[in-house]
Image (cartoon, rainbow, N blue to C red):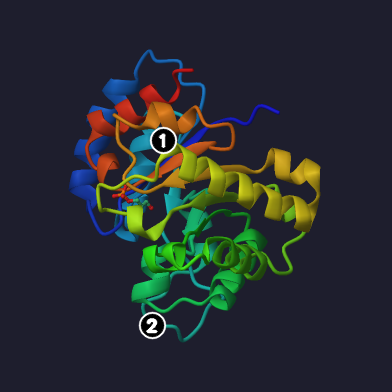
């Protein structure tokens, strides 16, 4: 089974519309003439989505747009929230859900994340569903239990057809923004385990098809070895995606067999 690699830039709370424009100008000149055999996604803050859409529309560069969050509700008295339907209006294709920063800083539970996944899918947004353990959980021998709960509870009620629209991102919390990357063995082992969870829940065929990105201190120097792992199907990149050249190199190096 060959799965198309998917590289997604998670800019977190960085780059307003001006910086988004600067980035896209450089990045587009980086990828010009390159035959990138992968999907490329950029997830800017909400306020830059419209600008990003305009910029990408001008040149039809094949770059897809993602949001970093969406509400679990349709509309109404939810101050500060953005609905999945509003994102669709801005031509957003993906939405990152369940990121560890949303879980730990904003207290999002598996139940809330499940409601958001459900709402995103109802509105034809493709979730990038993040899971991952803390260092304490890993060292306490809880890795598999944590991943099982996050996957099972996060995907509750999601149909086989809907699952086909989901990308999973395995992001060990201890590797995010720390410069410490999981070793290829650690990453491959966790990815294979997540795929086995999907096989238990949805069958072998769905498990073989679903893409599982790795995230956590991915950079140009390690993306090649990570992408060479059989169960790693792309990356969700934070810090190294903020610079156009470095994001380009992560992708380029990751595409080398
Ligand atoms: P870093 O690449 O900065 O470690 O961030 C990873 C991440 O959280 C992507 O969602």
Visible residue check, residue 160:
no
Q: Is residue 114 left or right of residue 13?
A: right
As drawn, the label of residue 57 is: 1
Q: Which of 88 and 119 lies nearest the eye of the viewer? A: 119
Q: In the current view of this chain or complex, which residue is farthest to the front?
A: 140
Please tell me how crowded label 2 is: few (under 14), some (14-19), or many (20+) other residues with Cα within 10 Å. few
Q: Is residue 51 left or right of residue 77?
A: left
Please tell me how crowded label 1 is: few (under 14), some (14-19), or many (20+) other residues with Cα within 10 Å. few
Looking at the image, residue 93 lies above or below residue 63: below
The image position of residue 8, as x and y in percent, is 42, 42
Q: Secondary structure at mark 1?
A: helix
Looking at the image, residue 110 lies above or below residue 38: below
Looking at the image, residue 29 lies above or below residue 25: above
Visible residue check, residue 123:
yes
Q: Residue at x 58, y 54 (%)?
A: 125
Give the tally of numbered discs. Answer: 2
- Dot 2 or dot 1, earlier in sequence: 1
Q: Which residue is mark 2?
A: 79
As drawn, the label of residue 176 is: none
The image position of residue 120, as x and y in percent, is 59, 62
The image position of residue 178, as x and y in percent, is 25, 53
């Amino acid at each position: 089974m060959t799965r198309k690699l998917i590289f997604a830039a998670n800019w977190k709370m960085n780059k307003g519309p001006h910086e988004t424009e600067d980035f896209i100008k450089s990045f587009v000149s980086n990828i010009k003439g390159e035959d990138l055999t992968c999907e490329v996604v950029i997830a800017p803050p909400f306020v830059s989505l419209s600008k990003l859409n305009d910029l990408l529309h001008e040149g039809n560069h094949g770059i897809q747009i993602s949001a970093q969050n969406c509400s679990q509700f349709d509309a109404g008295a939810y101050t500060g929230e953005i609905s999945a339907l509003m994102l669709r209006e801005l031509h957003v294709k993906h939405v990152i859900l369940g990121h560890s920063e949303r879980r730990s800083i904003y207290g999002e539970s598996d139940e809330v994340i499940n409601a958001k996944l459900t709402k995103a899918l109802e509105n034809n947004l493709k979730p990038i569903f993040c899971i991952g353990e803390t260092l304490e959980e890993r060292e306490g021998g809880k890795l598999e239990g944590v991943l099982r709960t996050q996957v099972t509870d996060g995907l509750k009620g999601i149909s086989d057809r809907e699952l086909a629209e989901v990308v999973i991102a395995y992001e060990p919390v201890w590797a995010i923004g720390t410069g410490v990357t999981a070793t290829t063995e650690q990453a491959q082992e966790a990815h294979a385990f997540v795929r086995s969870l999907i096989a238990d829940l949805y069958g072998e065929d769905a498990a073989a098809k679903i893409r599982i990105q790795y995230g956590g201190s991915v950079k140009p120097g390690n993306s090649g070895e990570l992408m060479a792992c059989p169960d790693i199907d792309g990356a969700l990149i934070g810090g190294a995606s903020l610079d156009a050249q470095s994001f380009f190199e992560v992708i380029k190096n990751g595409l080398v067999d």
